[in-house]
Image (cartoon, rainbow, N blue to C red):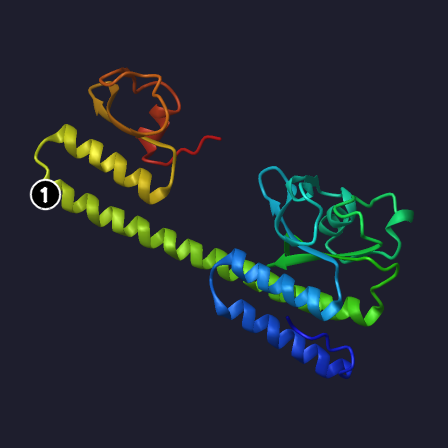
């Protein structure tokens, strides 16, 4: 456990905190491990009873807990809307929000009964909010201006960890996809039966792109025919089933050779 360094002058304290946080960020690309290390540093340096990193779900625009220390059981399952709670307000306004006495702040959402004061700092990547560093203390007005400044600097390391982990995840995904493309190319020369080949191709795509289901249609005259599928879903069209290729959106997709993405 790290020893708090309040007795060190402010400048040295800032350097020490950022150094330890930087080391945590560089130690691994595993996001959950990095975030737990960052939260441990924040807890120990700043004497925090409860600390968490909540992330923004881009689709639902809700905040959810990715990693936490000290929250009451079950509270880390709650999702907050933008503007809801101290953390939601920080995410919405893109600036730190401080409640020196949560009992007097109507915005407060209780994640731990021991909390008396709360500081929420948005995590920014390329000027966009990706989450919030939520710091809670069992003391009223625990966060003085110096502590708020240090935690704001400290939060940048959590943002860097998020960005690094996402970039690493994208690189792994690209590597899997390239391997799948190479495997498909090899299968086209190794598998002579067309039906077997198409099924193998669907399986390789599903695994590499991590989707629930892959269905492959081939064009025959004016129809699209289901020739193969692989995954966990049940197709509404049976194997060999067909429908008109002139129907939309398929007609435009075939005519323009473009990708269609439906939600």
In the picture shown, does residue 54 fall above or below 201?
A: below
Left or right: where 178 falls relative to 104: left
x and y percent of residue 116 in the render? 85, 54
Left or right: where 40 falls relative to 90: left
x and y percent of residue 163 in the render? 53, 59
Left or right: where 99 falls relative to 76: right
Q: Identify the residue shown where x is 38% and y is 37%.
A: 211
Q: Identify the residue shown where x is 21% and y is 49%.
A: 182
In the picture shown, does residue 62 fall above or below 151?
A: above
Q: Quadrant of residue 13?
A: bottom right
Q: Identify the residue shown where x is 61% and y is 37%.
A: 60
Image quadrant containing the N terminus: bottom right
Left or right: where 147 falls relative to 263: right
x and y percent of residue 93 in the render? 76, 51
x and y percent of residue 90 in the render? 75, 52
In the picture shown, does residue 117 fall above or below 240?
A: below
The residue carrying mark 1 is: 189
Q: Nearer the viewer, residue 150 or 138?
A: 138
Label 1 SS: helix
So how many labels did they put on this image? 1
Q: Nearer the viewer, residue 108 or 153?
A: 108
Disc 1 residue crowd, few under 14, some 14–19, many 20+, Cα 10 Å: few
């Amino acid at each position: 456990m790290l020893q708090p360094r309040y007795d060190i002058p402010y400048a040295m304290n800032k350097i020490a905190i950022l150094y330890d946080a930087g080391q945590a960020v560089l130690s691994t690309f595993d996001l959950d491990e990095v975030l737990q290390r960052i939260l441990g540093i924040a807890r120990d340096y700043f004497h925090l009873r409860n600390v968490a990193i909540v992330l923004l779900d881009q689709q639902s625009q809700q905040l959810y807990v990715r990693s936490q220390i000290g929250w009451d059981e079950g509270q880390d399952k709650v999702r907050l809307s933008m503007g809801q709670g101290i953390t939601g307000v920080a995410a919405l306004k893109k600036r730190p929000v401080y409640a020196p006495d949560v009992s007097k702040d109507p915005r407060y959402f209780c994640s731990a009964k021991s909390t008396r004061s709360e500081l929420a700092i948005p995590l920014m990547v390329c000027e966009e909010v990706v989450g919030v560093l939520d710091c809670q203390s069992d003391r009223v007005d625990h966060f003085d201006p110096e502590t708020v400044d240090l935690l704001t600097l400290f939060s940048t390391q959590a943002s860097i960890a998020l960005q690094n982990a996402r970039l690493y995840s994208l690189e792994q995904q690209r590597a899997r996809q390239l391997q799948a493309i190479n495997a498909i190319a090899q299968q086209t020369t190794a598998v002579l039966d067309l039906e077997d080949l198409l099924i193998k191709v669907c399986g390789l795509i599903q695994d590499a792109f991590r989707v629930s289901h892959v269905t492959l249609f081939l064009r025959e005259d004016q129809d699209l025919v289901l020739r193969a599928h692989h995954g966990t879903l049940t197709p509404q069209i049976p194997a060999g089933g067909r429908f008109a290729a002139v129907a939309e959106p398929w007609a435009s997709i075939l005519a323009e050779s473009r990708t269609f993405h439906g939600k």
